[in-house]
Each structure stands twice: as structure tokens, then as C-alpha cells.
Image: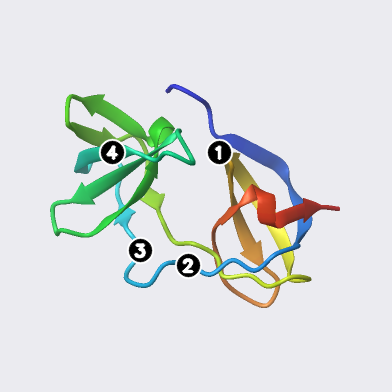
Amino acid sequence: MTTPVAAMNPPRRARAIAVHRPAAGPALRLRAGEEVAVGRRDDEWPLWFRCRAADGCEGWVPEAWLERDGGRAALRADYDATELEAAPGDRLTVHRAYGGWLWAEREGGGRGWIPARTVQFD
């Protein structure tokens, strides 16, 4: 792995300080060992790559999850690219951090990735 995914153990409490709205469309969900076509590195978030699954679904995948072989990669672990919708004041439980993003659960329901800059830890 290039940069480890920092697990919050125990998970940390936080709150959203800005609106985050996920992009429209289905979230990329992959199983460990599944192969994807690896596209471009994100300019703003350089530890993330645009990937396409065999079914044509695309999404951003953390470099740490990819076992790369040229323009293809196998997933090192199960991965879900769901983004978390949040509004200022939403209470969150953060489970992991990677490359400027956090995997979090929103109090009252919902979980997914949210930019770290939109969150303040308690």
C-alpha cells in the first residue's frame, strides 16, 4: 500500500461545517480481488484515481485500495465509493481518513465519504 488508510479507533465524533452533495448517479462498489480499469489521478485529491468496473460503473478509488498493474488494478479490499450528503451542523461519526476524505456515518442515517475540509472534529 502506498499511503495507509487511517482507521479511527475508536471512531471520532465530528460535525459538518459545510454542505456536501454527492455527484448524481450510482456509487461504485467493488469486492476484494475485483479488477478495474485505472484512469487519471485526481488533480485536487492526488491519492485518488478514476476507475471503471467491468459493468461500466465509474468512480474515484483510493490509491491504497489498488494493486496496480499498468492501466488495470485489482482491489485489495472491498470498497464503496458512496459519498455522504451533509449539511452544516449534521453530527457525524468518522471511521477512517484517507487522502483528504473521511468515511463517516451521519446521525440519523447515511454513510459514505465526505471531504475532510467540510468537517470539524469535536
Which residue is depicted at the point 50% across and 25% down? 3
Which residue is depicted at the point 17% across and 24% down? 70
The label nearer to you, 4 versus 2, is: 4
Q: CA distance from mark 1 to mark 4?
A: 18 Å
Q: Secondary structure at mark 3?
A: loop
Percent across and percent down for residue 47 are: 45, 33
Q: Amino acid at mark 2?
A: Pro
Percent across and percent down for residue 6 are: 61, 34
Question: Residue placed farthest to the right in the image?
Answer: 122
Which residue is depicted at the point 37% across and 48% down? 60
Asked if the residue at tag 2 contacts the one at tag 3, i.e. Cβ–Cβ closer than 8 Å, the answer is yes
**Sequence order check, earlier mark of 4 and 2:** 2
The label nearer to you, 3 versus 4, is: 4
Asked if the residue at tag 4 contacts the one at tag 1, i.e. Cβ–Cβ closer than 8 Å, the answer is no
Q: CA distance from mark 3 to mark 2?
A: 9 Å
Residue 40: mark in rendering: 4
Q: Amino acid at mark 1?
A: Tyr
